[in-house]
Amino acid sequence: MVRGTFKLMKSVNKSTILNKIRQCEPISRAEIAKLTGITPPTVSSIVKELMDEQLVEESILGASQGGRKPTMLLLNRNEHYVIGVDAGSDSIKACVSDLVGTILVRSELPIQPHTTIDSFLAILIQAIQLVIKELGTESSKVTGIGIAMHGVVEVATGTSLYSANSGLRNVQIKEVLEDIFDLQVIVENNSRAMALGEYWFGNYGTLKSFAVINIGRGVGSGIIEDGKLRYGAQDIAGEIGHMTISLDGEKCSCGNQGCFETFVTGDAIVRRAKKQLVDAPDDLTGEKVYEYALSGQKAYQKILEETGTLIGIGIVNLIHSVNPEKIVLGGGVMKSHEFLMPSIMATIQQRALTEKARKNTLITLSRVGDDATVLGAAALLLTKLF
Ligand SMILES: [Zn+2]
C-alpha cells in the first residue's frame, strides 16, 4: 500500500475550478463562475470541498470594488508538499516544493563515473532522505515523489530502461523508492520533466502545443499538447538528441552515427574547438569556450555561432515533425545564448518550410531556468492532483 496518494478528484468541475484558482489566484468565487461557466452554487460547494481538503484557502487581499470586499481564494501553500528529483548523469538534485513551485529545501549529491545500479540507487535514496530530514516534522505533508531521470524511461512501471550517459539499464526506480518511502513515485524522462516544469511554472498562459529542448550533456525535448506530455507508442517521442543529422558523422553514445547530440552538447563544442583551433588548451571545457567568447576572442565566438547554426538545424527538424506554437530552449549549453541565438534564429529563417512557420514559431529561452527539471519532477505529482 502506498500512503499519501492524493485523493484523486475525477470530477471535471472540481479540476476546472482548482486549475482556475492556480492560474488566476487570487480569484473570487464569482469570477470563477464567470470564467468557467459553472453555476455559482456549484462553485461554492466545490470550493468548500477544496478548502476541507486544505488545497485552497481564503485570503483577505480582495481588492475593494466599492462596497463589500469579495473574499479571494488562493492555493493553500502550507499543507501539501511534493518531492522533485533531477537524476542526472553526474549528480542527483532533490527538492521539496509546495503547490506553487516554491522550493522549501534542497540537496545535491555527486554520482561517480561508471556507477552501478546499486550505488546509483543508494545515492538517489540518500538525496531524498536528506530533504525529508531537513523538512523535519513538516515531512508528513509530503504527498509523493517525482523523479526526472536522464535517458529512456518506461513511465508505466517507473523503470529507467537505458541511459547512454551513465550506461545504466533497467533500473526499477519506482518499485525501489515506493518500498522505502511508502509514497507514490512517478518516474519520467528528464527532458520531459523539464518541459512540464517550464509549462507549469513559466507563466506562459494556455498554449496548444509547446516544446522544450534541453541542451546540456545530452539533448532531449519534451512536447506538451493540449496541456499533456506526449509520449508516443514506446515512450521515446521527443528523443531529438538521437535524430540523425549526418550519415557519416561521429559515433554517438547510443551507437548510431551523426546524431544531433554529437554536434551540440558541451563536449561536442569542446571537440570542435580543439579540432579547429590549434592553440586550444588541453583542459578546455564548454564553460571555458563561453568565457573566452565573452572575453572577446573571435575564434571562440565563431565556434559558438557555428553551434547555433547546428542547434537551428535540429530545431527546424522539430518544427517540421511537430510544428509547435512555442519552443523554449534550456540546459547548460544555452547559457551561451548571446552567441548562439542569432545563428539559431537565422537558420530557422533560412530553412523552415513556410513563411508562417518562420514567422510565427516563438523561440525563447527558459524562464524557470536551472530549477526547471527538478520542479518539473515535482509537477509530475501535481498533474495528478489538478
Ligand atoms: Zn545517438
Image (cartoon, rainbow, N blue to C red):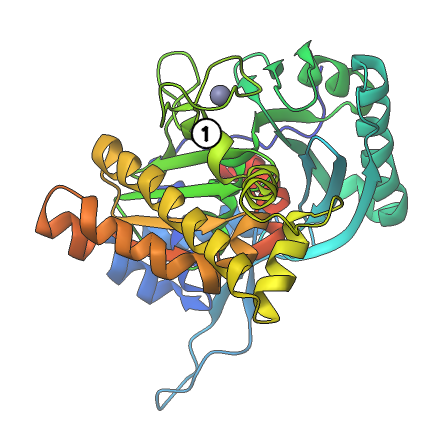
Q: Is residue 384 visible?
A: no
Residue that sits furthest to the bottom in the current view: 66
Q: Nearer the viewer, residue 299 or 133?
A: 299
The disc labelled 1 sits on which kind of residue?
Gly
Identify the residue shown where x is 43% and y is 55%. 305
Q: Is residue 12 visible?
A: yes
Regarding mark 1 in the picture, which secondary structure is present there?
helix
Q: Nearer the viewer, residue 243 or 194?
A: 243
Identify the residue shown where x is 42% and y is 49%. 306
- Above or below residue 168? Residue 302 is below
Q: In screen coordinates, is 190 left or right of 226? A: right
Q: In screen coordinates, is 121 left or right of 365? A: right
Residue that sits furthest to the top in the current view: 170
Which image quarter holds the N terminus?
A: top right
On the image, the x and y values in percent for residue 193 come to 53, 36
Task: Say which residue label 1 marks.
Answer: 241
On the image, the x and y values in percent for residue 253 come to 58, 20
- Above or below residue 73? Residue 279 is above
Does the closest atom of ligand 1 sit within 8 Å of the Cβ of label 1?
yes
Residue that sits furthest to the front in the current view: 278
Identify the residue shown where x is 66% and y is 50%. 280
Asked which quadrant contains residue 343, the reply is: bottom left
Q: Nearer the viewer, residue 242 or 238?
A: 242
Q: Nearer the viewer, residue 119 or 38?
A: 119
